[in-house]
Image: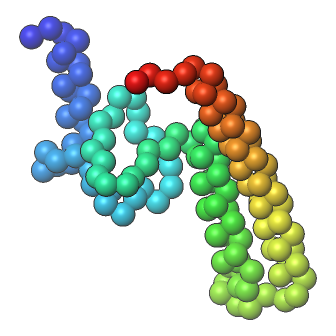
Amino acid sequence: MPADLLVEIAKHRAILNPAGQPPQFRNGTNGFRDFGTGTLAELHNREAVVPEDSNAGKFLANADKMQAQLNSLTTNNNGATINQEGVINAINQLNTTMSNTASILMSIEKNSKKQISALGSVGSVY
């Protein structure tokens, strides 16, 4: 067997769990994870693989921040209800995050329009 093939086999075996099965993410990965390079994935039905540095990845990262900020609107780290000033600060942070997310969405829209326009100029492939 060629040495490079053995290296590839060893790399893929390293991602298997002790039972020799690939890791399962039926309920997602709970955020971005480093899967290294060339990790195989088996997808079913309507699923997405989103690179963290893509526009969609940035949007998802902001969505996580917004959820955390919403969760912090009424409680502090000890679970106690926070005062009005704390709520105002949390709302201001949420507004900043939402503004950043809106900018990302506008960028996605702009890039999508450019791609659609470019596709239209290519012509039909059928």
Q: Position of residue 51 (x, y in %)?
A: 52, 40
How many numbered marks does the figure carry?
Answer: 0
Quadrant in the rendering for residue 71? bottom right
Q: Position of residue 16 (x, y in %)?
A: 21, 43
The N terminus: image quadrant: top left
- Drawn side of residue 89 relative to residue 79, left or right: right
Of all residues, the one furthest to the top in this rendering is 2
Residue 91 lies, with reference to residue 121, above or below; the image says below
In this orientation, which residue lies closer to the viewer: 4 or 120?
120
- Drawn side of residue 11 relative to residue 101, left or right: left
Q: Position of residue 17 (x, y in %)?
A: 21, 48
In this orientation, which residue lies closer to the viewer: 105 or 65?
105
Residue 5 lies, with reference to residue 87, above or below; the image says above
Residue 97 lies, with reference to residue 43, above or below; the image says below
Quadrant in the rendering for residue 3? top left
Q: Position of residue 87 (x, y in %)?
A: 83, 81
Q: Name which residue lies at 37% across and 55% down.
A: 46
Q: Name which residue lies at 23% across and 12% down.
A: 4
Quadrant in the rendering for residue 12? top left
Q: Name which residue lies at 44% across and 22% down.
A: 125
The C terminus: image quadrant: top left
Do we see residue 1 in this rendering? yes
Do we see residue 104 in this rendering? no
- Drawn side of residue 66 relative to residue 35, left or right: right
In this orientation, which residue lies closer to the viewer: 26 or 46?
46
In this orientation, which residue lies closer to the viewer: 105 or 79?
105
Residue 4 lies, with reference to residue 41, above or below; the image says above
Judging from the image, the colouring scheme is rainbow
Q: Name which residue lies at 69% across and 66% down.
A: 66
- Drawn side of residue 9 relative to residue 123, left or right: left
